[in-house]
Amino acid sequence: MKTQAAILWETNTPWSVEEIELDAPRNGEVLVKIAASGMCHSDEHLVTGDVPFALPIIGGHEGAGVVEEVGPGVTWLQPGDHVVFGFIPSCGRCASCSTGHQNLCDLGAQLGVGRQISDGTARHHARGEDLGLMCLLGTFARHTVVHEASCIKIEKDIPLSRACLLGCGVVTGWGSAVYAADTQPGDTIVVVGVGGIGANAIQGAKLAGAKRVIAIDPLENKREKAMEFGATHTFPSMTEAVQGIADLTWGTMANKVIMTMGAGDGSVLSEALALTAKRGRVVVTNIHPASEMTASMNMFDLTLMEKQVVGSLFGSGNPRYDIPKLIGLYREGQIDLDNLVTKEYTLEQVNEGYDDMRSGKNIRGVMIYD
């Protein structure tokens, strides 16, 4: 069939919206008509080259839609089912999945190649070339073919324009606070960067019982938004936050600091550690350039104060468990998905949406399809 998609042909160029040829699903695969896609900063990392996935590639990895066709061997999905895509597939059988770490499933090793899990070939084509898929999904498209390992079935009453956010940003941010940071009641939590991930880290910390949730962002509009999501205090920079956090905590500093900036920078980890209490933890969730090999930390401080620096992928969560759970929290009004969406765009407005993200206008843009 023919459909439309936004393709990145070369780094540091705009997304190209054009017609593609899409093959039918093969063994273990499903054809999905996408209803909505979040516009995550990770797709911007494709453009800059910080994430060196193979090009050309269809962007997008936060998606939700309706199954239109299933390939041979698919038994638990059928046409008409509503699904959210997990940006890391989960097989349920590898060592990581079987020990409760679906975010580290062995199938994730294929993300950078962008071909189908089942046989390593492409279903998406344009200009006579095979196309890769961002995170094996390619949600910047009206239709896509993905492996069933990337699909999580959801109830049909949940708006797909909000459910799509659960494919990455919501679980990643929420889990960074609840799982990776292990927020405890009464903790002081710092979230550095109030975008789509940071806003959800704030929500997760609040729901986990943090006494103080301190948001740091240079943009006033994002600091204001942070307060709406549950932050108790805000600062424009980590440098300016040091004395304020010391005053709030009687000098003990923050129990956990969660790094959720749009692009990570190893040179600022020393600032994050300066905000952290004895035996405190810095959670690095934001993506750093793949080529970055250095970080600035006071190792004397790290050792003598027993501080920790940990990484977190997909919020250290389990998408097949956490996505339905967070849908339940949304249904009950305990987390806010609606106000995460600053603006909606069409597929043809993909470059406008990323211009707005770069300028700091959006917490999260969402692409809506017909």
Image (cartoon, rainbow, N blue to C red):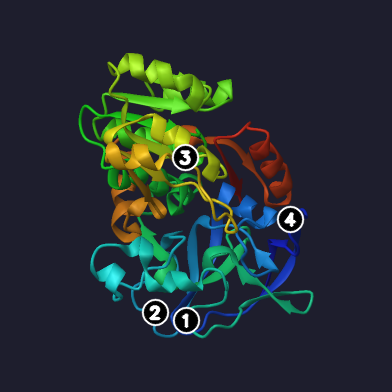
Name the residue carrying label 4: 15
Residue 158, visible in the rendered structure: no
Counting the numbered discs, the total is 4
- Is disc 1 placed on a helix, strand or loop? loop
- Read off the residue under disc 3: 269
In the rendered structure, which amino acid carries the disc numbered 1?
Answer: Gly
Q: Quadrant of the N terminus?
A: bottom right
Q: CA distance from mark 2 to mark 4?
A: 33 Å
* Residue type, numbered disc 4: Trp
Q: Is residue 39 above or below residue 94?
A: above
What residue does disc 2 label? Answer: 74
Q: Which residue is painted at 30% across and 42% down in the image?
A: 303
Q: From the viewer's perspective, is 110 left or right of 254?
A: right
Q: Earlier in the sequence, mark 1 or mark 3?
A: 1
Q: Amino acid at mark 2?
A: Val
Residue 214, picture quadrant? top left
Does the CB distance between marks 3 and 2 fall below 8 Å? Answer: no
At numbered mark 2, what does the secondary structure look like: helix, strand or loop?
A: loop
What separation in Å lies between label 1 and label 3 (alpha carbons)?
47 Å
The residue most toward the left is 185
Instruction: Give the spatial CA distance, label 4 vs label 1.
Output: 30 Å
**Which callout, 1 or 3, points to the residue nearer the camera?**
3
| Tag 3 secondary structure | helix
